[in-house]
């Protein structure tokens, strides 16, 4: 099996009730739980919105992420799958879609 | 200490234009940079990504066979490191060898577990 | 045309030389708790070499090919076990194996020549940890560092595979339990720790040199492996100690005579009757060079003296030229630092040579009723020799008989049997 990264983007919505939020979190829990059970989950974390971006060889620092809005990276997951398509298939069940996220699926690459 | 993520942005154009020897040298610089963080027990992990990818768009049904952001915004890899605050993490990020090869680094704090 | 035999031979030779080094590096990478994993990788590389070379012929640099194959396999294993608990990546250097950014560079560093050498020597010291029994030390060295199969180790010890597997298991458990780190000891520890290593090497050498074995190949293998281990100690500055040079010299002198000690039928030939023209002059010369290098510092070890004695034999053109006075002097010195029954008995044999049977008997009688001594076949063989010279053949035969019962060696038994037959004729 190969390893893949899900880059989860966008999908911030402040207009949800606490119950809705709670339910959404439970969906995440269930999905990640099922990945863990099939030994496909490697890791992953959500990110805070605050960001610094280094450009121009590190000389310039700006106080925001490079891409914002629906392109803002909100978190990532590392999973195992047989192929890029297989990984994309699994990603379709990501609860992030309930909030309008997009998921970019990328394969981990060795540096050689 | 908090955890931060370095998101490396930019495509492989520069990398591909270099000779194997230059690439080798560049890898040694990464080795050194990450090695120093590891020695200070500030390195947690990280991976490099292949530049091709699939994107599943909002709704979860439409799939396109390329990354959502490309060119200079393409995510090329990430590292997770430890630092006290985002300013310190930003200082650490300045040593990233990728910056010399036209890459951008986005520094983000990992959502704390509670 | 490269045939199977040629490939088999090269690979065999390469494997004896290199597998221990590869295993050592892999143990460094995977951790002492994953010795089996390290051994499997090396075994896989060997199998792959056999299969690939058979079809595509031998590569230009077979050694580099083997190392590269093992390294690539190790990278695969690291990738697969990155998130499992099989390998402990907590050490900062090992942590770099977990990221694609640093994996290959880190891996390449592990396989640099100096690191290979350090890891191999480190493993030698780990195998010869003073808490591990000598028997288990050698068993483990042969298996992990000399590329012997369990079956070959069993043959070397005239034992069975079961026993050997148990010994290997115990040593591995010891490593695991005590988290032994395979490193070259620090300068304040290096002397005593090296003594234990040399002891194991010399035992291994003697296992091959002394004729308890009918199997010539195994014997020569043990001898050359012991010498190879000693040589690798001499290849590193920190372990270039006088005692190491002395043992190397001693083994060269002994090894130079290996082919003259047995007849084609496997019967022992006495030193006085050996064909000295068959002695390996090149090995004797290397022995001399090692012995010269052993002469720095103020340490006089048993190896120095044993080497000096062996040298006296090697440089006598014929038996009659032997400088027995000198040899006796060395034995006296040897007895002072090591009160070893074998040394004592050998000294009696020198006295017999130099001053005749009466003096030799007096020397032996000084320790009569020594229970320990009586267990040695050599004690009875020496007494037999003395009585034979005193022309008391009946007593001599009794002692030879006793000696025959005590020796494990087929050749020694045959030798004594022939002697008895001759004197009772």
Image: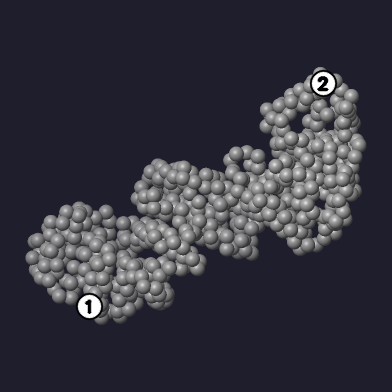
Image quadrant containing the N terminus of chain C: bottom right
As drawn, is B78 to the left or to the right of C144? Answer: right
Q: On the image, numbered disc 2 is attached to which residue?
A: A18
What residue is rendered at 30% in x and 80% in y?
Answer: C317
Between disc 2 and disc 1, the foreground one is 2
| Whether residue C3 is visible | no
Q: Residue furthest top?
A: A19
Chain letter for mark 1: C
As drawn, is C290 to the left or to the right of C182? Answer: left
Q: Crowding at label 1, few (<14), some or many (≥20) Cα neighbours within 10 Å?
A: few
As helix, strand or loop, the secondary structure at mark 2 comes to helix
Q: On the image, numbered disc 1 is attached to which residue?
A: C325
C324 lies above or below C132: below
Contact (Cβ within 8 Å) of mark 2 with mark 1: no
What residue is rendered at 26% in x and 71% in y?
Answer: C333
A16 lies above or below C198: above
x and y percent of residue C262 in the render?
31, 65
As drawn, is B11 to the left or to the right of C155? Answer: right
What residue is rendered at 80% in x and 31% in y?
Answer: A91
As helix, strand or loop, the secondary structure at mark 1 comes to helix
The colour scheme of the drawn protein is: one colour
Q: Are marks 2 and 1 on the same chain?
A: no
**Which one is nearer the viewer's eye here, A77 or B109?**
B109
Q: Quadrant of residue C11?
A: bottom right
Image quadrant containing the C terminus of chain C: bottom left
Q: Quadrant of residue C305?
A: bottom left
């Amino acid at each position: 099996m190969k390893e893949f990264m899900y880059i989860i983007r966008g999908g911030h919505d402040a207009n949800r009730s606490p119950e809705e939020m709670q339910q959404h979190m439970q969906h995440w829990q269930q999905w990640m739980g099922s990945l863990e059970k099939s030994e496909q989950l490697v890791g992953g974390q959500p990110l805070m919105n605050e960001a610094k971006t280094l450009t121009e060889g590190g000389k310039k620092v700006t106080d925001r992420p490079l891409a914002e809005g629906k392109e803002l990276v909100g978190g990532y997951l590392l999973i195992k799958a047989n192929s890029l398509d297989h990984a994309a298939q699994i990603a379709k069940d990501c609860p992030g879609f309930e909030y309008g996220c997009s998921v970019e699926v990328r394969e981990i690459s060795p540096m050689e | 200490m908090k955890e931060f993520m370095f998101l490396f942005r930019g495509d492989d154009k520069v990398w591909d234009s270099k000779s194997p020897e230059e690439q080798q040298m560049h890898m040694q610089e990464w080795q050194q940079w990450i090695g120093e963080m590891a020695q200070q027990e500030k390195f947690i992990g990280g991976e490099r990504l292949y530049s091709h990818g699939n994107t599943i768009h909002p709704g979860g049904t439409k799939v396109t066979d390329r990354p959502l952001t490309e060119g200079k915004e393409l995510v090329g890899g990430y590292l997770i490191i430890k630092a006290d605050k985002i300013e310190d993490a930003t200082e650490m990020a300045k040593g990233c060898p990728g910056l010399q090869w036209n890459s951008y680094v986005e520094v983000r704090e990992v959502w704390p577990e509670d | 045309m490269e045939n199977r035999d040629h490939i088999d031979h090269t690979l065999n030779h390469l494997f004896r030389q290199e597998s221990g080094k590869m295993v050592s590096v892999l143990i460094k990478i995977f951790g002492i708790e994953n010795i089996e994993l390290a051994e499997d990788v090396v075994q896989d590389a060997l199998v792959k070499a056999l299969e690939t070379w058979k079809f595509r012929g031998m590569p230009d640099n077979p050694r580099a090919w083997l190392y590269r194959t093992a390294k690539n396999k190790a990278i695969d294993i690291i990738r697969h076990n990155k998130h499992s608990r099989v390998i402990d990546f907590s050490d900062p250097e090992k942590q770099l194996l977990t990221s694609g950014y640093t994996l290959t560079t880190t891996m390449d560093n592990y396989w640099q020549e100096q690191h290979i050498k350090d890891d191999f020597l480190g493993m030698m010291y780990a195998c010869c940890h003073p808490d591990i029994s000598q028997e288990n030390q050698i068993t483990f060295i042969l298996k992990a560092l000399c590329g012997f199969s369990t079956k070959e180790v069993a043959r070397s010890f005239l034992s069975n595979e079961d026993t050997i597997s148990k010994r290997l298991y115990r040593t591995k458990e010891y490593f695991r339990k005590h988290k032994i780190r395979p490193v070259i000891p620090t300068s304040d520890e290096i002397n005593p720790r090296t003594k234990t290593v040399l002891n194991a090497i010399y035992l291994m050498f003697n296992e091959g040199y002394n004729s308890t074995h009918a199997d010539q190949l195994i014997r020569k293998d043990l001898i050359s492996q012991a010498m190879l281990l000693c040589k690798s100690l001499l290849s590193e500055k920190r372990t270039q100690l006088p005692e190491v040079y002395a043992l190397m010299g001693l083994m060269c002198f002994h090894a130079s005579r290996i082919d003259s000690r047995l007849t084609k039928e496997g019967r022992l030939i006495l030193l006085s009757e050996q064909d000295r023209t068959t002695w390996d002059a090149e090995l004797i010369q290397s022995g001399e060079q090692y012995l010269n290098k052993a002469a720095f510092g103020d340490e006089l070890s048993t190896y120095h003296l044993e080497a000096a004695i062996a040298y006296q034999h090697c440089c006598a053109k014929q038996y009659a030229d032997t400088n027995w006075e000198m040899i006796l002097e060395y034995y006296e010195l040897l007895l002072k630092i090591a009160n070893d029954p074998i040394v004592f008995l050998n000294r009696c044999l020198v006295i017999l040579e130099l001053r005749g049977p009466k003096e030799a008997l007096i020397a032996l009688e000084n320790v009569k009723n020594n229970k320990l001594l009586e267990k040695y076949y050599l004690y009875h063989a020496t007494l037999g020799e003395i009585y034979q010279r005193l022309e008391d053949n009946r007593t001599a035969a009794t002692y030879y008989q006793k000696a025959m019962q005590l020796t494990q060696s087929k050749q020694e038994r045959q030798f004594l049997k022939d002697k008895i037959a001759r004197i009772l004729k």
